[in-house]
Image (spheres, coloured by chain):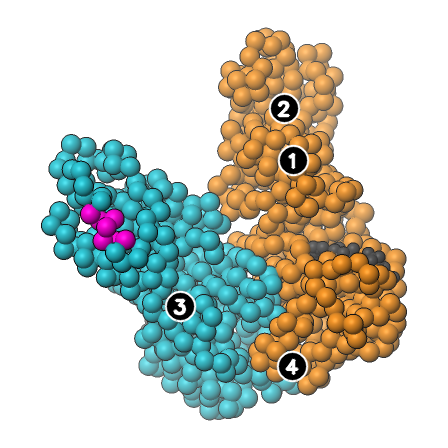
Chain colours: A orange, B cyan
Amino acid sequence: MRVRVGIVGCGTVGTGTAELLLKNGHLIRKKTGLDIVLTKVADVDWERPRSFEVPHHLRTTHYTEVIEESDIVVELVGGKGFAKQVILEALEKGKHVVTANKHLLAEDGKEIFLKAQEKGLWIGFEASVGGGIPIVKALREGLSANRILNIYGILNGTTNYILTRMLEEDMTFDEALAEAKRMGYAEADPSLDIDGWDSAHKITILATVAFGKFFPFGSVHVEGIRQVDLLDVELGKELGYTLKLLAICKRVDSEVELRVHPTFIPSEEQLAKVSDVFNAVMVEGDFVGKTMFYGRGAGSHPTASAVVADIIDIARNIAGGIRALHPFYWEEEELHISSNFYSRYYLRLDVPDRPGVLAKVAQVLGDNGISIASVLQKEKVCRMAGREGQSVIPLVLLTHKAYEKQMRKAIEEIKNLPMVEGHPVLIRVEEEKL
Amino acid sequence: MRVRVGIVGCGTVGTGTAELLLKNGHLIRKKTGLDIVLTKVADVDWERPRSFEVPHHLRTTHYTEVIEESDIVVELVGGKGFAKQVILEALEKGKHVVTANKHLLAEDGKEIFLKAQEKGLWIGFEASVGGGIPIVKALREGLSANRILNIYGILNGTTNYILTRMLEEDMTFDEALAEAKRMGYAEADPSLDIDGWDSAHKITILATVAFGKFFPFGSVHVEGIRQVDLLDVELGKELGYTLKLLAICKRVDSEVELRVHPTFIPSEEQLAKVSDVFNAVMVEGDFVGKTMFYGRGAGSHPTASAVVADIIDIARNIAGGIRALHPFYWEEEELHISSNFYSRYYLRLDVPDRPGVLAKVAQVLGDNGISIASVLQKEKVCRMAGREGQSVIPLVLLTHKAYEKQMRKAIEEIKNLPMVEGHPVLIRVEEEKL
Ligand SMILES: NC(=O)c1ccc[n+]([C@@H]2O[C@H](COP(=O)([O-])OP(=O)(O)OC[C@H]3O[C@@H](n4cnc5c(N)ncnc54)[C@H](OP(=O)(O)O)[C@@H]3O)[C@@H](O)[C@H]2O)c1
Ligand SMILES: NC(=O)c1ccc[n+]([C@@H]2O[C@H](COP(=O)([O-])OP(=O)(O)OC[C@H]3O[C@@H](n4cnc5c(N)ncnc54)[C@H](OP(=O)(O)O)[C@@H]3O)[C@@H](O)[C@H]2O)c1
């Protein structure tokens, strides 16, 4: 069975995908019995040097040729404008689609999936989350018997690299970012990564797959790591926690928390040990318990591995003559996004080194229904922060679980205490469930 | 679309599978559009208390009733005799099969798979390796675009628990085994686990899936952990290594190494951090690079999660009317099992504390073409081994890579050196590739 594949956008992932199809085509034929043929690759610029030379007869600058000559159209342009046009045109012309475009799917996924559904066509998007890690398939098929309870993801390699360098080499955020740029792990404008948007796109897609429902991207709570202070990374380490930019999707009854923010997790957790540019997704299901999927979250070859896995799946369906799809958005019950998160907190205040300060802060927290789990010892903090003998020292508190609203109110009051200097630092702590 | 499922064997996994199908049936219907109905469960003894009460009208003591009344027969009896009969009878009667029986598949898989192939029927066996971890699907589908290079698995929870206790709590093997029994992690007769057979069954199955070829089970090299000395666990830790019972499937050109043995791996590796009863499989593919899959490798609920994932996949195929299967043993090239492994070694000898001993041992290794990478300092070893002032002390050497044959020959010569007491301890070290 011959299945024709065309690629639109021959950049990092497009080039890797062409290379994989051409290099492993023979092996794939042996494994699957499918003859998957690359028919055309479109890009605007064929002069630019690439890591792999796409054969001349496959090159074009007209994406419409790709759509014409393929059964499966692979969109690897990125962004929301032209990419969306390519996908919708392909679907309109009855072509199946594979894409790695998390940005587009997180924001306009509903329109695209409904269109594909209407047309009875497949959309593969494994590569949009976790690079080469087959996490979409795991959620949709491998763990399909489970009610999914929680997803915790380290979904962005750039930020994980930076936080790893801060933790292990005592670098500041700026130093670690500069190094990430030197290593090619951060783009010239790294804001999509650093400010948490990329992770937010990915967790939105995973939430859709896990709960069968489209969640508006605007309802995801997003904080990045730009403000992370090395002092807190180090104080957290001392307390037994590792700071990660965690993407969280957590079900509590009929509510779902969807959030991305710097998070302290216990250092002995498997997820805490995911370092450098690696990604990992921890999924908890009602029967399977905790599972974790780990690997390279980006890069030409790993991402191509996921793109081609989707191509193979769709080709198998084409060969099998399967057209009727069951929509994967099945959750008719009302699942709401919750914004009043319930978690533990790490709180650091800069306060004068004199008696009574802790009592005052504890009083405010107590008045807001928040109880303190532990306080980091004064001398230790001073030594670690290199602030011995200074008049203002950090005071670190770990709270028990509290609602976000309570905590925000308490923080406002604490900020107004006369002895508190600067802005309190508040970092959520995830425990138990991980 | 209604698909009928019956279970033969209602023990740990069978009970969990019945529970899952009955509790999550509604959710599965919403997710997949498939109406998967449990029609019958067979067991010899219905008096025994179970963690879940199978409804009376589903119970039978005749497995033939299960085969009659199902489209998919789930074999969860275990063992090789009766289980094989159930599977072959089900296939003969045109029923698809799901099984968790690693023992049977590793030893008689070829016969069973060929029979299913001949009949155009599906066999699901996700639960046979790694409990709830969807590793078979990852290898067959998620990573299908890759040429698989290596698989490293921690595939047995009992042995991983014991080694974790030895490492973290300085327990001897016997103490840790006793604790594992108390915790219900080890059976009364733990030899299948302890002696490496269970891991060997599982790596044989993964090798078949990865390389599309049936390897005779007898050709797997198997060593268990019964002989592991706490001293070596501790000396390894000092050198930066963690001891694991690793199941290894490694491709070198047209040869495959298939082996299970205690192995030192660098402590900072993700796999080294898999502790207690958890399982993990590290897969390296030519495009995806390193990926890891982690979770509970056993237990009623996690294993049921994998069994039902297979049921859903097969039900989807039944509903889609797909019968023609591409065989998953595709590798026509000659792939041979290699027994002359190539790896690094940790070597411990008990020798008198006097000059010249190291030189003699180094001489023998050198004569056999093996070079020494490092020697653990004498004083340090004595202190750690609690043997200060004794006349016989441990001498620890780490070698560079060498062939097994060279090493075995060298060991024979070293054993015959007059100053070497007792039996030298030899443990393979896996680095680089992990
Ligand atoms: N890079 C990764 O590791 C990675 C990982 C996971 C997912 N993704 C996703 O994969 C997608 C592609 O990413 P990428 O890193 O491969 O991006 P990229 O390197 O920027 O590649 C995009 C390519 O599309 C080409 N292009 C732009 N407009 C076009 C048009 N009108 N017609 C034809 N080609 C056009 C670009 O050409 P010129 O640059 O020559 O103009 C460029 O070669 C994105 O959605 C991204 O989010 C990437
Ligand atoms: N347990 C795990 O966590 C796990 C994980 C992965 C894979 N597996 C595999 O799953 C399979 C089942 O394991 P398990 O732990 O569930 O074993 P188990 O608890 O011993 O269950 C086997 C059941 O089969 C019943 N049985 C024996 N002969 C029978 C017959 N002739 N007709 C009907 N029923 C019969 C047994 O009944 P009686 O005992 O009452 O005689 C028992 O209830 C094995 O292949 C195992 O390797 C187990």
Count residues near mark 1 (Cα–Cα under 10 Å), then give few for <14, some for 14-19, many for 20+. many
Chain hosting mark 2: A
Nearer to the camera, B416 or B175: B416
Picture quarter with ligand 2: bottom left
Circle 4 SS class: loop
Tag 1: amino acid: Ala
The answer for how far apart the CA atoms under marks 2 and 3 are is: 53 Å
Q: Nearer the viewer, mark 1 or mark 4?
A: 1
Q: Position of residue B384 (x, y in %)?
A: 26, 36
Residue of label 4: A34
- Span shown in magenta: B360-366
Name which of mark 2 and mark 1 comes first in the sequence. 1
Point 61% across, 78% down: residue: A26
| Residue placed under numbered mark 1 in the picture | A176
- Label located before the other in sequence (1 or 4): 4
Mark 1 falls on what kind of element?
helix
Q: Which mark is in front, 2 or 3? A: 3
Magenta span contains residue B362:
yes
Pointer 1 with pointer 4, Cβ within 8 A: no
- Residue at x 71% of width, y 44% of height: A186
Asked if the beta carbon under badge 3 is closer than 8 A to the nearest atom of ligand 2, the reply is: no
Up-down: is A264 above or below B280? above
Q: Chain under label 3?
A: B
Residue, x 45% and y 80% (percent of image)?
Answer: B334
Chain letter of mark 4 equals: A
Look at mark 3 in the image and give the residue it sits on.
B257
- Give the dominant element type of the magenta stretch: helix, strand or loop: helix
